[in-house]
Amino acid sequence: MRRFLRNLSAVWAALGIAAVAWLGLELVLSAFGSEGGAPLVDVANTDALADQAQAAALFDELYSGRLQHRFEPFAHYRMKAYAGQHVNVNADGWRATPTSAADGPTVWVLGGSTIWGMGARDEGTIPSHLARALRSARVENLGQIGYTSTQELITLLARLQAGERPDVVVFYDGVNDLLSLLKLGRAGLPLDVPRRELEFNITRPDELPRLLKATVANVARKSKVLGLVRGTGERQPARPIEDPERAAQDALRAYLANVAAAQGLAERYGFEVMFFWQPTLFGKAKLSASEKAALAEEASFAPVYRAAQAQVATSTVVVDLSDVFGEDPAPTFFDFCHLSEAGNLRVADRIAQVVAPVLEGR
């Protein structure tokens, strides 16, 4: 019996030493920023960001792990408060718009990561450039990374329920509503639905095995040690679409239902609402070397996006910005949909051309 206990103690001691060693290695890798994936400097050094001030420092901050989300009823999540060098988020979860006027007509800008400002400092986001163009308007950036138009509509409704009133609301969409269909096989869903489904009722006593399985899987997914073992791996392709035209129609049906609902809220609460379909690499005429590489990575997305864009181009309600860069060869995309700060400026100027006359008339 004593021998058994000695052996058991030795096993526990070995496991303890292994756990401490593992934790130490995880901490070391975290300190040196190893993510087990593509180096962030590759993104910062794309053609579009080559001349953007402090791009490497910005991406280091964006992917440092310090920016986190919190639960948000109905919309699933919202950004936590954060104070950084290039990125700042207030207590309500909205990113800073330092160029905005302190008062004046209120403009709310809703969208996904392209509005939130992935790849841009606070002063270089689309809402910040829009605030400069509109000068006397109080522009608020209500974008959230990964949001679809349904989540944006819920965000709008929640603010109206709270008694807040805008003068103008801008929706800027396209990519995420189509990605929802491509990645999940169904239009209109938030992109994080699989994770929310996994978490549903997971704390019930009878779901303990599922909780343990999910915990182990999450630890393994985030482990930097295992990341080194796995390597970067291949990117998972988007769900193949046999009929791009039909898929685009399905996605636009859900999107346009949200457009109609937002118009109804605007009429009821007395504000103006405008809708913009965002540009992507699929509509840019002349591409740089890194833009061509980014386009090739998203080849499976191209047919559906182009089909949707062709249908949006005929709309009398949605302003299509797909041609915003025209024949300009200057690189503006650092991936298939996110823009440099200079690209954000071009988009904001086009949006301002539509918004400014409406503000003057209020």
Image (tube, rainbow, N blue to C red):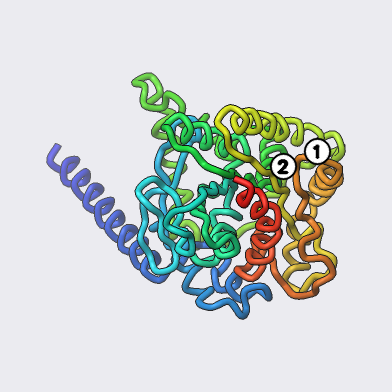
What is the x, y in percent for residue 36? 51, 62
Q: Amino acid at mark 2?
A: Leu
* Residue sticking out furthest to the left: 2
Q: Amino acid at mark 1?
A: Ala
Q: Evaluate whether residue 219 shows in this view.
A: no
Q: Evaluate whether residue 14 shows in this view.
A: yes
SS of the residue at dot 2? helix
Mark 1: give few (<14), some (14-19) or many (20+) Cα within 10 Å.
many
* Residue sticking out furthest to the top: 206
Distance Cα–Cα, label 2 vs label 1: 7 Å
What is the x, y in percent for residue 7? 21, 46
Q: Nearer the viewer, residue 190 or 38?
A: 190
At 48% from the left edge and 64% from the top edge, which residue is drawn?
Answer: 99
- Verify CB contact (< 8 Å) between mark 2 and mark 1: yes
Mark 2: give few (<14), some (14-19) or many (20+) Cα within 10 Å.
many
Q: Which residue is mark 2?
A: 178
SS of the residue at dot 1? helix
Q: Which residue is mark 1?
A: 248
Instruction: State which tag comes first along the sequence, 2 or 1.
Output: 2
Q: Quadrant of the N terminus?
A: top left
Q: Nearer the viewer, residue 200 or 169?
A: 169
49, above or below 307, in the image: below
Q: Disc number at residue 63?
A: none
